[in-house]
Each structure stands twice: as structure tokens, then as C-alpha cells.
Amino acid sequence: GGGNGGYGQGMNGVANGMGNMNMGSSYNVSSSNNATIGTNADELYGGARISFIFHQVFSRSLNSVTAFDGLSEDEIRTTIGNANGTRPALFVPEISFDILVRRQIRRLEQPGVQCVDLVYDELQRIAAQSEPSELTRYPNLRDRMMDVVGSLLKRSVGPTQMWVSNLVRVELSYINTNHPDFIGGSRAVAKLMDKMAKDKEKAAVDAATAAASVGAPNATNYTAKGIMTPVKERNNKDKDSDVGA
């Protein structure tokens, strides 16, 4: 009877330990080496670590992939020239745009696969640290349970990485140029004409301001420089003294 009770307590401890793997809650279960999880205030654990991977590590990796990352002007000109062939085109051919865009979209696959690997490592860590102390009384059960959990996580890595790759392939299959954030040829020309008109208007205002400053000089400044000195008008007493002389 005592043996069955101990076994039941051990299984309850296993269930509680595995239940603490919930990503939405913290876990504070002592592992087999009697080290309490989450006591280090300088390190994130469990769900907090996975949230950090998604919102910080993965986000920075995606933001580091820019539209022109790894593209030089020579490569762009070469791609456009290859799309034109022997006959030069008046506008940029669409096939060259598709080639360059698909090349940049493929760069998003690596950050996604890396994110899956980081989450898998953290889940393995959670599984190892969620071991209740009662499980040490049943070494065979402990080994078998860790094998089952490890194989379950390992089987899930491949399909998850494949799902990330398929998501990128879906984006590669169709380039949506009708998106409101996409600046197509007509919008690009309209923005360019707008900028040229504003630059022309600004240049005209600057020229008018410069002409006004040259045509109407400041008398005070000229006087200070000695260019123009006002002549004092002599009074009548000075004039009479000049006549008497």
C-alpha cells in the first residue's frame, strides 16, 4: 500500500511539473539537483524567454532585412539589362522587379527558422527543469518520461520549420503590387513630380528673397561700413560767417 501511495505521489508530482510548462504561467518547481528555477534575476526563463525571442530577437532579425540589403546598383542595372534583352525599354521591365523582390523575400526565411530553433531549445530547457523531486525515486520512469518529452519536441521542430518555409514560399508565389503601401510606377512618378514642383517653388522663393535683399540694402549697415556717410546741413549762422569772411 505504501509503495502504491508513493508511486501515486510521484505521478502527481510529474503531472504538476509538466503542467508548469504552460507558457502563460511562471514555474517554480525544483529540479533533480534541488536548484530552484527562476531564482536568477538576471536571466529570463520559460514563457518570458520565449516572449523575448518572439518580440525582441525575431523582431530585430526581421527589421535588419532591408529592401536593398545585399543589392548593389550594378546588380540592379544588370538584372534590368538582362530583362530588356537586345531591345531597350522605356520603363523598368516587371520581370526584373519580380526577380529582385523574390530574392529579398527569400532572406526572411532564415530569421524564421532561427526563431524556431531558439524556441525549441527553450522548451527543452523547460522540460528538463520541470522535473519534480519525487521523480528521482523512479529513475526508469524519469528516463522514459524525458525521452518521450524530448522526442515529442523533436518531432515538432521539422514540421514547424517546414511551415515557416511554406509561408515564405506563399509570399513568393504572388507579389501583390496592389497593396496600398506599395509605390508603383504611377505613384513613384507622381511623387517625383511633386518633389520637383516643391523644389522649383522653393528655388523661386529663395531667388526672390535674395533679389529683394540686394535691391533694398540696409542703410544702417552701409553707414557702419563707411560706404555712405550722411552730410550735415549747415545752419544759417554758419552761412553768415562764411559770407562775412
Image (cartoon, rainbow, N blue to C red):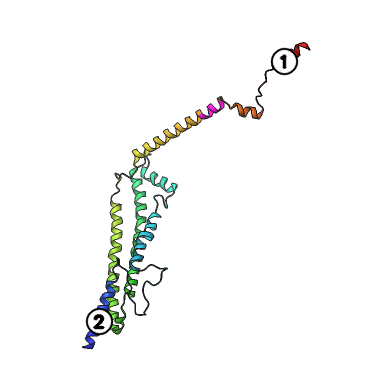
Q: Which of 17 and 206 is in front in this view?
A: 17
Front position in the image: 13 or 184: 13
Q: Give the x, y percent position of residue 131.
A: 31, 77
Q: Which residue lies furthest to the top in this view?
A: 243
Q: Looking at the image, which residue is at 29% across and 81% down? A: 134
Check residue 210 for magenta coloring.
Answer: yes
Disc 2 designates what residue?
9
| Side of 225 relative to 182 (left or right) | right
What's under tag 2, amino acid-wise? Gln
Specify the segment rendered in magenta. Answer: 209-214
Q: Residue at x 33, y 48 (%)?
A: 98
Q: Does residue 58 lie above or below 93 as drawn?
A: below
Q: Work out which quarter of the rendered image holds the N terminus and state it.
A: bottom left
Instruction: Categorize mark 2 by other alpha carbons within 10 Å: few (<14), some (14-19), many (20+).
Output: some
- Please say whether residue 137 is one of the residues in the magenta stretch: no
Q: On the image, numbered disc 1 is attached to which residue?
A: 237
The spot of residue 14 in percent (x, y) is 27, 77
Identify the mark at residue 115; answer none if there is no mark. none
